[in-house]
Structure formats: structure tokens, C-alpha cells
Image (tube, rainbow, N blue to C red):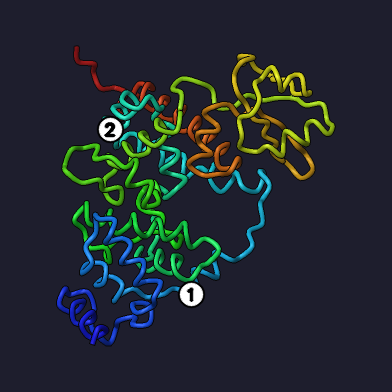
């Protein structure tokens, strides 16, 4: 009777027919406990949650993708995927189309416009590639059938239900990546709940379809994670090879040392940088067997809070710089007068 009641409720809410319902997931004890826990915490509605779970479809292919070993690519192979002519041109166009929102976000959050533009371009090609999985399916699959990270994804699923309720949207209508990332900036539900903003004041935080909200949300995220407006991201460096350098390379994302301390360990900045600045040594294989080094500063570290990858942080920085240069060149290059097809025509003063 309990099963029939829940399926009837789902059908009544227009979510699913009894034939379509994933009864096995709906009735699992761990799913029932999850519903009970979330209702007890508040901010969700039992009937709405049950209606969603009655319509959730497990996606085993997501587990296969999550468990597929990833092979880290060297920098010279990674970079061309994002530092590309198409993304540069689209980035300039996106900036031109959203100048007012980007200017306001830069002033409010103290984050350079080019960084916001580069992030949205790298994440979703300016909204062209945001993911086709129903988020309810993807997050439920990972929350209940992926033990290695089940705790994390149950937290994200809980945030997702609260997101749908607070934004007054049908949870089954929202789509994203196979891992649950959403919208133009690919926020996870917890990031959305904490840092997404209604930047145009229309009463919704729509990072799926509203560029202004996506722009403001990325700016807010970077500000909240310590971005220092006007500061450098990286500076080139030379190293004295040895065990001390190997130890520093293993540090990866951590700002444990000042520039002065790194100098004492055999790292020499090749550009002006304060001795008291915190930095991390970043090695990049620029060609097969050819390694170059940079010092990643505070803003480099902040980019790795968005995506925990030194390759991602470096390509974001490089793409942002190139988009800014092209945007400024297009903005300040005077328009050329149209050629006069009739050179004998008189000049009218």
C-alpha cells in the first residue's frame, strides 16, 4: 500500500506514471532514511521529494565514467583544448554582449572581467555545453550507488532539493553534467546555494539561461575565495634541480611558502614579486621532455579553488589575458571610413 500511495502521489503531481516509476530506488531503506533526515532538517517537502524519487532513473553509465581512470595530460597537450581561437573569439563576443554586467561585477567583487569571461568559456563554451543529464538522476545515482563518494553526493543531492524549492522550479526539469554541475559556470548545488547571486534583480538566480546571473555568481565565488583584484596570477621562475625542488613540486596547490623561502630552496623568480608573497611552484611540460616553472601566487591558488588543477588555473590565466587584449584592441581601434568607390566624386564639406 505504501508503494501504491507514493506512486499515486507522483502521478497526481504530474511527474510520472506508475509504469515509469523506479520503485526499487524509491523503496530502498537508504533512500527512505535520506528523505526522513532531510525533512527533519527542514527546507524541503516530503511529498515533493517522494514525487521526484518516484521518477528518478538510475544511470549506471555515470558510475562507469566516474570510475574510469583518468590519465593526466601534459601541459602541451592540455592547453590547445582551451587556449583556442574559437574560445578567444567567443570570449570577446561574450564580453561585448555583456559589458554592463561584467563592468558592474568587476566593480562590486573586485575581480577582473577577463577572468569571469574565461571561466565561463572554459566551463561551458559560453553556455553552449552545460550538460544533458537530469540532475535528479545524476545526483541520485551518485548519492546511492557510488559508495566511494556517496557522502559528498548525498550532501549535493540535499542541496539540490533545497535549491529547487527555494527557486520554485521543478527538480526534474533541471539539467547539468553527469557529476551534477549546473549552468553556465558549472556550479555544484552547494556552490549554487552559497555563491550564486540574482545579479539582475529579477528574483531568480538563473545560472542556466541568464548571463548576468552567471557573471555575478562567478565574480562572487572568486571574491569569497580570496581573489585579490589587480594582483598577478603567476610569474616565471628558474629552479636549481634537486630534492628540495621535488618536494616543492609535490606541494601542488598549497601556499605554504613565501617567495623569500622559495628563493632559499633554489627557486628564482624571473619577474618582480614581493618576498613576503605566498607562492607555490608550478612545473609545466611545455614540450615533450621540456619543463618550465612558474610561481603561482594567491590568485592562481584562488583559481584552483574553482577547479583543483594547476593546468586549469594556468590556461584560465592565459586565456583571460588574450581575451582582454583582443577586447581592448577591438574597443579602441578606430573604425576605418568606408572606401569611396568613385574616386572622382567631389568632396562635400
Q: Which mark is residue 101?
A: 2
The quadrant the N terminus occupies is: bottom left
Q: Residue furthest top?
A: 349
**Image position of 337 (left or right of 74):** left
Residue 49 or residue 171, whichever sits in front: 49
Up-down relation of residue 158 to residue 52 (above or below): above
Q: Quadrant of residue 154?
A: bottom left
Classify 10 Å Cα crowding around label 2: few (below 14), some (14-19), many (20 and above): many
Q: Which residue is mark 1?
A: 60
**Image position of 240 (left or right of 94):** right
Up-down relation of residue 202 to residue 348 (above or below): below
Q: Is the residue under label 2 in contact with that under label 1 (CB below 8 Å)?
A: no
Q: Residue at x 55, y 31 (%)?
A: 300
Residue 330 or residue 108, whichever sits in front: 108
Q: Secondary structure at mark 1?
A: helix
Q: Quadrant of residue 29?
A: bottom left
**Image position of 114 (left or right of 297):** left
Q: CA distance from mark 1 to mark 2?
A: 40 Å
Q: Residue furthest front?
A: 40
Residue 245 visible to an observer of this rendering: yes
Q: In x, y percent, where is residue 12?
A: 15, 77
Q: Nearer the viewer, mark 1 or mark 2?
A: 1
The quadrant the C terminus occupies is: top left
Q: In x, y percent, where is residue 186?
A: 40, 50
Q: Residue at x 46, y 20 (%)?
A: 230
Mark 2 or mark 1, which is nearer the start of the sequence?
1
Classify 10 Å Cα crowding around label 1: few (below 14), some (14-19), many (20 and above): few
Q: Secondary structure at mark 2?
A: helix
Q: Residue at x 66, y 52 (%)?
A: 72
Q: In x, y percent, where is residue 324?
A: 44, 29
Amino acid at each position: 500500500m505504501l508503494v501504491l500511495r507514493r506512486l499515486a502521489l507522483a502521478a497526481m503531481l504530474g511527474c510520472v506514471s506508475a509504469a515509469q516509476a523506479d520503485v526499487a530506488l524509491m523503496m530502498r531503506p537508504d533512500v527512505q532514511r535520506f528523505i526522513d533526515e532531510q525533512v527533519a532538517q527542514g527546507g524541503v517537502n516530503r511529498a515533493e521529494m517522494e514525487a521526484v524519487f518516484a521518477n528518478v532513473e538510475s544511470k549506471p553509465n555515470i558510475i562507469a565514467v566516474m570510475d574510469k581512470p583518468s590519465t593526466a595530460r601534459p601541459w602541451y597537450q592540455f592547453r590547445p583544448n582551451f587556449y583556442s581561437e574559437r574560445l578567444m573569439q567567443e570570449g570577446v563576443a561574450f564580453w561585448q554582449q555583456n559589458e554592463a554586467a561584467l563592468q558592474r561585477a568587476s566593480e562590486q567583487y573586485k575581480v577582473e572581467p577577463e577572468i569571469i569571461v574565461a571561466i565561463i568559456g572554459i566551463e561551458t563554451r559560453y553556455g553552449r555545453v552545460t550538460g544533458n543529464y537530469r540532475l535528479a538522476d545524476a545526483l541520485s545515482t551518485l548519492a546511492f550507488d557510488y559508495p566511494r563518494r556517496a557522502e559528498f553526493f548525498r550532501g549535493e543531492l540535499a542541496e539540490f532539493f533545497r535549491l529547487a524549492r527555494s527557486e520554485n522550479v521543478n527538480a526534474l526539469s533541471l539539467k547539468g553534467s553527469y557529476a551534477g554541475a549546473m549552468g553556465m559556470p558549472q556550479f555544484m548545488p552547494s556552490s549554487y546555494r552559497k555563491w550564486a547571486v540574482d545579479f539582475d534583480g529579477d528574483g531568480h538566480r538563473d545560472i542556466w539561461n541568464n548571463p548576468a546571473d552567471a557573471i555575478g555568481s562567478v565574480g562572487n565565488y572568486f571574491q569569497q575565495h580570496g581573489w585579490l583584484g589587480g594582483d598577478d596570477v603567476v610569474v616565471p621562475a628558474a629552479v636549481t634541480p634537486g630534492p628540495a625542488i621535488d618536494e616543492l613540486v609535490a606541494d601542488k596547490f598549497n601556499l605554504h611558502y613565501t617567495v623569500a623561502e622559495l628563493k632559499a630552496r633554489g627557486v628564482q623568480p624571473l619577474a618582480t614579486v614581493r618576498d613576503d608573497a605566498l607562492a607555490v611552484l608550478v612545473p609545466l611540460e611545455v614540450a615533450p621532455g621540456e619543463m618550465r616553472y612558474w610561481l603561482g601566487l594567491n590568485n592562481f591558488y584562488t583559481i584552483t579553488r574553482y577547479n583543483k588543477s594547476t593546468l586549469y588555473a594556468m590556461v584560465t590565466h592565459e586565456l583571460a589575458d588574450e581575451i582582454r587584449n583582443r577586447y581592448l584592441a577591438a574597443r579602441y581601434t578606430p573604425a576605418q571610413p568606408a572606401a569611396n568607390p568613385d574616386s572622382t566624386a567631389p568632396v562635400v564639406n
